[in-house]
């Protein structure tokens, strides 16, 4: 098996929203904001190439089909793109066999659907199966008021219409050595891929722990629907990661791709090592 980081560019989000109840005097040391209180975040995807040559993509970034007005809210920047990063590994859209969508918020699923030459919305990866789950898909179809702006039908309904969506259960192994666990604090049934790799486990944390700066338990985003559930889920997942020396993969950290952690004497968690995936 091979694992590769797929960078799709950077965007900006409000620092207070990203760090929740943590005071700015503290969180600004972790990710300094600009004069609008916006911090830079990555949209970092993962490419898995299995031994039998399945080419699996985890998340797809924000895409490029929304209006310039929409993108102006998030100050997209950087030289990387989803398809450009895949091309650096010799892959075209038709080469991707599977896409695991951790959840259907626009910055995770936007690149899953593209406009074709006839201005029609079509799956970006025409030969891929797109993996989600019943509970989360139902939420996206009938979103609550807080999440409505994050679930854009044009990002996922074309997948359903094309008949390429498959649903998995919590803990299910999608392919040998690749399973998903569900969490509910950020949004209902967000899927966290667990990948057996180099005699260890890599956990793709999506928005449960979006950056190395969110490893401490109290650092919970204001975007989370159920922050106390997130708190419990973080303690569970990070406890296992520390005890089993798992590798954590951060989707939104602007600098750090991967980390290992340990439990502190006070029962919290701290990062002990950060590194790029290709240095593992």
Image (cartoon, rainbow, N blue to C red):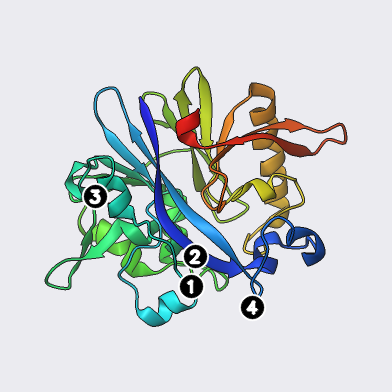
Number of the label disc, if any, that sits on residue 36: 4
In the image: residue 198, left or right of residue 14: left
Asked if the residues shown at circle 2 and circle 3 are in contact, with their CB atoms under 8 angstroms apart, the answer is: no
Mark 1 → mark 4, Cα distance in angstroms: 12 Å
Q: Residue at x 24, y 42 (%)?
A: 96
Number of the label disc, if any, that sits on residue 164: 3
Please tell me how crowded label 3 is: few (under 14), some (14-19), or many (20+) other residues with Cα within 10 Å: some
- Name the image quarter holding the N terminus: top left
Asked if the residues shown at circle 3 and circle 1 are in contact, with their CB atoms under 8 angstroms apart, the answer is: no
In the image: residue 237, left or right of residue 111: right
Mark 3 → mark 1, Cα distance in angstroms: 31 Å
Number of the label disc, if any, that sits on residue 11: 2
Q: Residue furthest toward the top? A: 199
Nearest the viewer among 130 and 196 is 196
Q: Earlier in the sequence, mark 4 or mark 2?
A: 2
Asked if the residues shown at circle 1 and circle 2 are in contact, with their CB atoms under 8 angstroms apart, the answer is: yes
In the image: residue 254, left or right of residue 28: left
Nearer to us of marks 3 and 4 is 4
Mark 4 → mark 2, Cα distance in angstroms: 14 Å
Per the image, label 4 sits on a secondary structure element best described as loop
Q: Residue at x 60, y 48 (%)?
A: 208
Mark 2 → mark 3, Cα distance in angstroms: 29 Å
């Amino acid at each position: 098996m091979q694992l590769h980081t797929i960078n799709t560019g950077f965007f900006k989000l409000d620092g207070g929203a990203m760090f929740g109840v943590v005071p700015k005097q503290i969180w600004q040391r972790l990710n300094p904001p600009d004069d609008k209180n916006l911090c830079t975040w990555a949209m970092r995807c993962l490419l898995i190439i299995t031994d039998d040559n399945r080419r699996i993509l985890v998340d797809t970034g924000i895409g490029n089909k929304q209006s310039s007005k929409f993108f102006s809210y998030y100050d997209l920047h950087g030289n990387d793109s989803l398809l450009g990063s895949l091309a650096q590994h010799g892959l075209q859209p038709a080469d991707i066999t599977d896409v695991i969508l951790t959840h259907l918020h626009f910055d995770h699923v936007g690149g899953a659907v593209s406009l074709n030459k006839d201005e029609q919305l079509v799956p970006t990866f025409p030969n891929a199966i797109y993996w989600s789950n019943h509970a989360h898909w139902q939420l996206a179809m009938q979103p609550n008021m807080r999440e409505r702006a994050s679930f854009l039908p044009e990002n996922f309904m074309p997948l359903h219409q094309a008949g390429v969506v498959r649903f998995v259960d919590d803990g299910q192994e999608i392919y040998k050595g690749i399973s998903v666990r569900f969490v509910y604090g950020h949004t209902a049934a967000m899927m966290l891929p667990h990948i057996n790799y180099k005699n260890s486990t890599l956990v793709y944390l999506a928005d449960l722990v979006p950056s190395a700066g969110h490893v401490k338990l109290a650092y919970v985003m204001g975007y989370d629907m159920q922050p106390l559930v997130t708190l419990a889920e973080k303690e569970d997942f990070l406890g296992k990661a520390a005890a089993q020396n798992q590798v954590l993969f951060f989707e939104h950290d602007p600098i750090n791709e991967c980390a290992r952690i340990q439990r502190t004497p006070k029962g919290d968690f701290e990062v002990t090592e950060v590194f790029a995936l290709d240095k593992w």
